[in-house]
């Protein structure tokens, strides 16, 4: 089965070359598997690289709540050596553990299986609570989508996490503004999400979700309390014909488009 | 049974600290537990989906997590959280639903739990505990607490007749000797059946068994009952649960699979809300044929033609 290794902590900054190589690997993995969800993976990839290269320590826990960005998570783990190329070649294949959404109990780096939205934040709250009750060190990070904030369970989790004062819990929101069948503005008037969350009494910050240094600085703050970090991102980031295009939530790449995408990213 | 449950949890907590989450319920029942547990007793508020996922997160970090609510708020509202976060991860979260069957009576159908264990047993690794008597609660909480699987405890109201002492707890127990047929009860309605059958002599009544844990794959029909069914292949299953996913359907499947040649199989179970009217637990039992008078008739039919 998998050749994955134990989690490694490197604390290295993410530079443009690393991000470019990761984008290329993500595109190749999706192209070879013939699957979509590329747009939301590309919007989340930079944050996942920063988390896995610069932020996460051995005692920290990361939960991918937007499970459809599993590909970006697998590539982030590949980029720091936890997964090998032959692992990624099993993406979406038969008898794989690298399914389209993370599966349970497969890898220590992926402690929570997700896919249905609205589960990751409350589970991460349970993990943060367990750390407090057992006096364990480490922080908990969870990455949600912006459309995911239409799920009631996400707001339930916000109420709970704030009331319980869960220190060291950081919720990242991949705010690419597009969801499954429209923009978040069209579907559910989701503009002003930060203000709405802040109204619950939670600290909210916004940062460019493709600026590695800015994200690293925002995420590396001490675990003083619950915090929400809204990542302003672009769906399909890095591939011009995908950027801000809803259809790249679903579409796979054909030969011609894959070649164009690779050329663009390679030249970036 | 809530009182017995609370006492059992308080005792357990002294030996084995755990975390207890309630969905804002437990007034005049769980206060002693709240006092005993301190920060590990958490009122998660009216947010059952979050509560279940939090429990899964706690369990994923090695903590024993119990979740308590009125039964349907515990298993129906957060079903996907139980499915994905608890069961697919194989986490031993302990669910406790108060008010199994029609126990909440005229509070209405939203508070009833007539499909709970059937629904939950569709999920991976799930175990079900259904106390028949208040005295079952303590051993069941001990077994459930040590169970490595997700589990659900269906609390109800004890109906043990005065003067009747149940045998020591086991997943399958024979409550009354009998001949020529078998009644299998699930849950507190076993007490009503004791009341109906115990005045009759053993040679003029069916044997009465009670089943308190599911699935049957984990608790197969015990050898003495199997032997009795081979000699007296007439069975009546009584439970306050709908037919789909019922213990009766599981028992029929197991007996068929095992080649036990049952000649007469009857099943009295919850029928939902046939009249559209609402009332006490007794009212709804009567509409389903689960009241003492109806059960007496079904038991008499069980004996078959002379």
Image (cartoon, coloured by chain):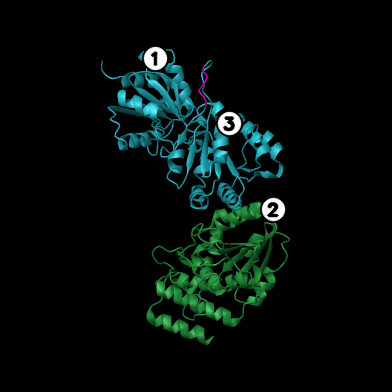
Residue at (44%, 68%) from the top-left corner? Answer: A91
Residue occupied by mark 2: A132
Q: Residues within 10 Å of mark 2 (few under 14, many from 20)?
A: some
As drawn, is A28 to the left or to the right of B53? Answer: left
* Residue B254, image quadrant: top left
Which comes sooner in the sequence, label 3 or label 1? 3
Task: Give the letter of the cyan chain.
Answer: B
Residue at (39%, 29%) from the top-left corner? Answer: B223
Q: Is residue B217 above or below residue A250?
A: above
Residue occupied by mark 1: B202
**Viewer-proximal residue, B222 or B52?**
B222
Residue at (49%, 68%) from the top-left corner? Answer: A3
Q: Is residue A196 above or below residue A40?
A: above
Measured in 3D between alpha carbons, the distance from the residue under mark 3 to the one under mark 2, in whole angstroms, is 30 Å
Q: Residues within 10 Å of mark 1 (few under 14, many from 20)?
A: some
Q: Are marks 3 and 1 in contact (CB under 8 Å)?
A: no
Q: Which mark is residue B138?
A: 3
């Amino acid at each position: 089965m998998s050749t994955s290794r134990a989690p490694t902590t490197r604390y290295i900054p993410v530079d443009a070359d690393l991000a470019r190589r990761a984008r290329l690997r993500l595109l190749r993995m999706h192209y070879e598997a013939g699957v979509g969800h590329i747009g939301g993976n590309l919007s989340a990839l930079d944050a996942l690289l920063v988390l896995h290269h610069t932020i996460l320590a051995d005692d920290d826990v990361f939960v991918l709540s937007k499970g459809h960005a599993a590909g970006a998570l697998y590539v982030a783990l590949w980029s720091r050596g936890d997964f090998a190329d032959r692992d990624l070649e099993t993406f979406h294949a038969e008898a794989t553990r690298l399914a389209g959404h993370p599966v349970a109990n497969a890898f220590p780096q992926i402690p929570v299986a997700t896919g249905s939205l609205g589960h990751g934040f409350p589970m991460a709250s349970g993990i943060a609570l367990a750390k407090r009750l057992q006096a364990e060190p480490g922080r908990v990070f969870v990455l949600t989508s912006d459309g995911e904030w239409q799920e009631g369970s996400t707001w339930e989790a916000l109420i709970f996490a704030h009331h319980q004062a869960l220190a060291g819990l950081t919720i990242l929101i991949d705010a690419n503004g597009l969801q499954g069948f429209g923009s978040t503005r069209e579907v559910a008037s989701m503009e002003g999400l930060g203000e709405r969350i802040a109204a619950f009494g939670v600290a909210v910050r916004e940062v460019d979700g493709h600026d590695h240094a800015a994200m690293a600085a925002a995420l590396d703050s001490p675990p003083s309390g619950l915090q929400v970090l809204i990542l302003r991102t672009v769906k399909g980031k890095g591939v011009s014909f995908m950027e801000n295009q809803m259809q790249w939530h679903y579409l796979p790449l054909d030969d011609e488009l894959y070649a164009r995408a690779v050329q663009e990213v390679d030249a970036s | 049974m809530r009182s017995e449950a609370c006492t059992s949890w308080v005792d357990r907590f002294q030996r084995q600290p755990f975390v207890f989450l309630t969905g804002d319920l437990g007034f005049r029942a769980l206060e002693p537990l709240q006092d005993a547990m301190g920060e590990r007793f958490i009122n998660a508020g009216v947010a059952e989906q979050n509560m279940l996922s939090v429990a899964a997160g706690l369990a994923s970090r090695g903590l024993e997590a119990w979740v308590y609510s009125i039964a349907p708020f515990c298993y129906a509202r957060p079903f996907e959280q139980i499915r994905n976060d608890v069961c697919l991860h194989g986490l031993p979260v302990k669910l406790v639903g108060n008010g199994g069957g029609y126990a909440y009576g005229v509070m209405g159908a939203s508070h009833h739990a007539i499909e709970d264990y059937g629904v939950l047993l569709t999920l991976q690794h799930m175990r079900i505990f259904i106390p028949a008597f208040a005295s079952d609660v303590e051993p069941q909480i001990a077994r459930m607490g040590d169970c490595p699987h997700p589990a659900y405890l269906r609390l109800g109201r004890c109906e043990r007749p005065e003067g009747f002492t149940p045998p020591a707890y086991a997943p399958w127990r024979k409550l009354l000797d009998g001949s020529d047929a078998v009644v299998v009860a699930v849950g507190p309605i076993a007490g009503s059946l004791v009341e109906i059958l115990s005045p009759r002599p053993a040679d003029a009544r069916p044997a009465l068994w009670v089943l308190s844990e599911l699935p049957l794959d984990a608790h197969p029909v015990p050898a003495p009952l199997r032997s009795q069914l081979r000699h007296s292949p007439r069975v009546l299953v009584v439970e306050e649960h709908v037919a789909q996913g019922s213990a009766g359907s599981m028992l029929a499947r197991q007996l068929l699979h095992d080649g036990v040649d049952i000649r007469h199989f009857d099943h009295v179970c919850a029928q939902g809300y046939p009249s559209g009217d609402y009332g006490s637990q007794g009212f709804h039992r009567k509409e389903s044929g689960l009241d003492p008078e109806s059960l007496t008739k079904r038991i008499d039919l069980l004996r078959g033609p002379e």
